[in-house]
């Protein structure tokens, strides 16, 4: 099977297997307990937070561990909006092409208003400034790169617009952590260990000390991760991130070469339109998305699965309350179906060479 659906589920790095085995063997104690085993687990958890903080340019105490990316988004959006609601109201500005779980958080915890993106999926900083001018906002929720189109956002322009009015920026950096340097200037980040090869989903919030947060759940000994978080999982995630960062230059160059082959294969197929920024410098190497004309993405994905290709379709983290493919609609793309291909550190040429005729055959058959 050719694996082309690594969104949030990058195959585990070899170091992750070793780290998990080591973590389970030595960090199984309860980090809340003041004995040798508990203190060892606490040291492992703190070391993991230190590593995550170091990668994004923060402090250990700025890092909050959560059970998933969705929980990380809910945690930071809920806590930040609760801390600012009395003074700044409940209006939350959110990027129109943000992942569905981010949109859900914005609509659930506040009065959400979307900020448009252009045809390449890049947020319009001018439109963001206009939204700010139209009324008081409690926070802005955006992203470093889009999980569907691969579009890399102009974060310095976004940060400048936020700073001009004193509105904190919460940035979903799950797609870029371990793959790109994250520009400074953010007030809070959300990350996902599943994106850098830990082998499981684990969410992280990184919030600057100046970003006021107020928990929106009952008090707990661990204010930011009630009930506690597995030290072995956090340790494994941190080790995998370290390796992803150490290997990213060579890895991203190799993946760019593979994605160029894949894009050429896709562009040769009638009824298929590759979406997102055309310039390589403005898009993520590992994501290639296409709009389909006259074909349903789910049906095509099923047939590709039978042909030995695992691919993604629809919008990541979709649900019944926000329509699938809202990212393409935000970009103004006309489509009948959508496919998303994502590569990872184990992808090879045989995964992409010759894919065009396979897709063409599937489209003709349905």
Image (tube, grey):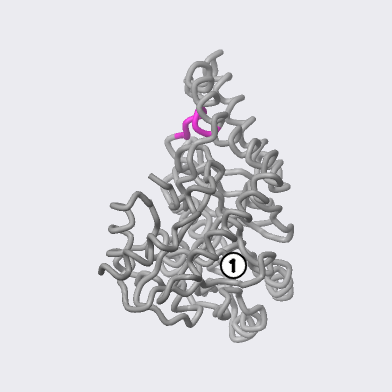
Q: Is residue 356 above or below residue 336?
A: above
Check the image and report above or below for 242 versus 192. Answer: above
Residue, disc 1: 151
- Please provide percent x and percent y for residue 240: 58, 35
Which residue is more in the foreground, 120 or 185? 120
Which quarter of the picture shows residue 363? Answer: bottom left
Residue with the most extreme top position: 36
From the viewer's side, name the closer residue of 137 and 2. 2
- Name the secondary structure under disc 1: loop
User: Is residue 86 shown above or below 30?
Assistant: below
Tell me where residue 265 appears, x and y as whole percent. 50, 64
Residue in view at x 47 percent, y 31 percent:
230
Where residue 234 appears, as percent x and y from the top left, is 53, 34
* Quadrant assignment, res 244: top right
Please, is residue 232 above or below residue 173 in the view?
above
For disc 1, the neighbor class at 10 Å (few under 14, some 14 to 19, many from 20) is many
Q: Residue furthest left?
A: 366
Residue at left offset 66%, top offset 81%: 129
Can residue 33 be seen at all in this image of the molecule? Answer: no
Residue 62 in sight from this viewpoint: yes
Check residue 37 for magenta coloring. no
Q: Which residues are magenta?
A: 228-234
Q: Front-most of 206 and 38? A: 206
Q: Quadrant of the N terminus?
A: top left
Q: At which x and y percent is residue 289? A: 48, 66
Instruction: Decide which of 341, 358 is in the foreground and name it.
Output: 358
């Amino acid at each position: 099977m050719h694996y082309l659906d690594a969104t949030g589920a990058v195959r585990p790095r070899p170091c992750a297997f070793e780290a998990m085995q080591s973590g389970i063997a030595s960090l199984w104690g309860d980090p809340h307990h003041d004995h040798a085993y508990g203190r060892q687990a606490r040291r492992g958890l703190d070391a993991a937070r230190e590593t995550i903080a170091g990668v994004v340019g923060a402090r250990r105490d700025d890092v909050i561990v959560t059970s998933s990316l969705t929980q990380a988004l809910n945690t930071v959006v809920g806590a930040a909006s609760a801390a600012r609601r009395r003074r700044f109201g409940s209006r939350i500005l959110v990027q129109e092409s943000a992942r569905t779980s981010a949109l859900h958080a914005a609509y659930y915890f506040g009065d959400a208003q979307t900020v448009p993106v252009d045809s390449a999926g890049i947020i319009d900083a001018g439109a963001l400034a206009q939204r700010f001018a139209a009324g008081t906002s409690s926070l802005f929720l955006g992203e470093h790169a889009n999980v569907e189109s691969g579009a890399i956002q102009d974060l310095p322009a976004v940060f400048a617009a936020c700073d001009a009015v004193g509105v904190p920026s919460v940035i979903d950096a799950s797609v870029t952590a371990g793959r790109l340097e994250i520009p400074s200037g953010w007030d809070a980040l959300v990350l996902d260990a599943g994106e850098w090869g830990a082998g499981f989903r684990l969410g992280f919030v990184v919030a600057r000390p100046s970003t006021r947060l107020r928990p929106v759940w009952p008090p707990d000994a661990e204010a930011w991760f009630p009930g506690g978080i597995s030290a072995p999982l956090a340790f494994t995630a941190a080790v995998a991130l370290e390796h992803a960062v150490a290997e990213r230059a060579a890895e991203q160059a190799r993946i760019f070469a593979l994605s160029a082959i894949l894009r050429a294969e896709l562009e040769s197929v009638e009824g298929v339109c590759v979406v997102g920024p055309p310039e390589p410098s403005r898009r993520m190497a590992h994501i290639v998305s296409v709009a389909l004309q006259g074909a349903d993405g789910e049906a095509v994905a099923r047939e590709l699965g039978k042909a030995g290709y695992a691919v993604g379709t629809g919008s990541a983290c979709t649900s019944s309350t926000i329509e699938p493919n809202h990212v393409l609609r935000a970009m103004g793309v006309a489509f009948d179906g959508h496919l998303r291909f994502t590569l990872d550190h184990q992808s090879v040429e045989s995964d992409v060479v010759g894919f065009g005729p396979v897709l063409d055959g599937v489209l003709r058959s349905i």
